């Protein structure tokens, strides 16, 4: 016959293990003290942009479209991505193992070092000549012209771009994108879109 004392010890041990497991699960889902565990994410982190790149849709066969591809203009999208390093980050909620960022939270960044972004044509595109600064013809997903984009707070580090130029059939968008930093330096990327079919 099992003594009542042994049964009590087993119950206490199970209770402690269940409590510790619950804390581990909670901490693994929440790594920001400002984050609401029921769905809201924490505040933005300060960051510095370190580089810039462009990539193109459509995304097929586990890769983005490249300059050797041919795509319909209806499926074509341009994305600008900022590489970054985080300057400040909220401290973790504890020292338990298994901590991770909540999967539903996208990056929320306040870029500190960006002065602006510009885009210049390297070859003719539509009715625009090579060397044309098209920053005032490119808008972000927030309907802000690239030439007017100066607020880099609350950013995900990625912008979907719309270019208000109608290309000719079987042409390509060849650009030089310049990330202007506040210290006077620049990060430059030259990029070529896939071949665009307009009819």
Image: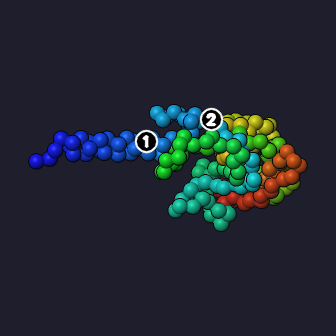
Report the number of numbered marks: 2
Instruction: Indicate left or right for 39 with 118 as reference.
Output: left
The disc at residue 23 is 1
Q: How far from the left and from the top, in percent, is residue 96?
A: 49, 47
Choose the circle earlier in sequence order: 2 or 1.
Answer: 1
Residue 162 showing in the rendered view: no
Q: Residue furthest bottom?
A: 68
> In this figure, which colouring scheme has been used for the structure?
rainbow
Judging depth in this view, the residue of 114 and 47 nearest the camera is 47
Residue at image coords 52%, 62%: 61
Instruction: Indicate left or right for 172 with 36 as reference.
Output: right
Instruction: Indicate left or right for 47 with 119 as reference.
Output: left
Residue 199 drawn above or below residue 135: below
Label 2, secondary structure: give it: loop
Contact (CB < 8 A) between labels 2 and 1? no
The disc at residue 43 is 2
Residue at image coords 65%, 62%: 66
Residue at image coords 24%, 41%: 8
Residue 159 is drawn in which quadrant? top right
Q: How far from the left and from the top, in percent, is residue 37?
A: 48, 35
Q: Nearer the viewer, mark 2 or mark 1?
A: 1
Within 10 Å of disc 2 (Cα), the crowding (few <14, some 14-19, many 20+) is some
Residue 63 showing in the rendered view: yes
- Whole-angstrom CA distance, mark 2 to mark 1, is 23 Å
Residue at image coords 72%, 46%: 87
Within 10 Å of disc 1 (Cα), the crowding (few <14, some 14-19, many 20+) is few
Q: How far from the left and from the top, in percent, is residue 3?
A: 16, 44
Q: Residue furthest left?
A: 1
Q: How far from the left and from the top, in percent, is residue 167?
A: 72, 51
Residue 54 is drawn in which quadrant? bottom right
Label 1, secondary structure: give it: helix
The disc at residue 6 is none
């Amino acid at each position: 016959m099992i003594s009542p004392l042994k049964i009590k010890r087993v119950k206490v041990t199970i209770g402690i293990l269940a409590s510790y497991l619950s804390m581990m699960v909670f901490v693994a889902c929440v790594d920001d003290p400002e984050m609401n565990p029921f769905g809201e994410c924490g505040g933005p982190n300060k960051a510095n942009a370190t580089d810039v790149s462009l990539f193109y849709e459509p995304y097929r066969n586990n890769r983005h479209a490249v300059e050797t591809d041919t795509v319909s203009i209806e499926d074509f999208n341009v994305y600008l991505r900022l590489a970054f390093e985080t300057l400040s980050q909220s401290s973790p909620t504890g020292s338990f193992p298994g901590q991770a960022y909540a999967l539903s939270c996208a990056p929320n960044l306040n870029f500190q070092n960006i002065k602006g972004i510009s885009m210049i044509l390297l070859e003719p595109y539509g009715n625009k000549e090579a060397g044309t600064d098209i920053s005032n013809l490119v808008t972000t997903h927030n309907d802000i012209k690239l030439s007017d984009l100066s607020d880099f707070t609350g950013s995900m580090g990625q912008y979907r771009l719309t270019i208000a130029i109608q290309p000719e059939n079987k042409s390509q968008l060849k650009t030089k994108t310049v990330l202007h930093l506040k210290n006077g330096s620049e990060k430059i990327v030259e990029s070529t879109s896939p071949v665009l079919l307009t009819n």
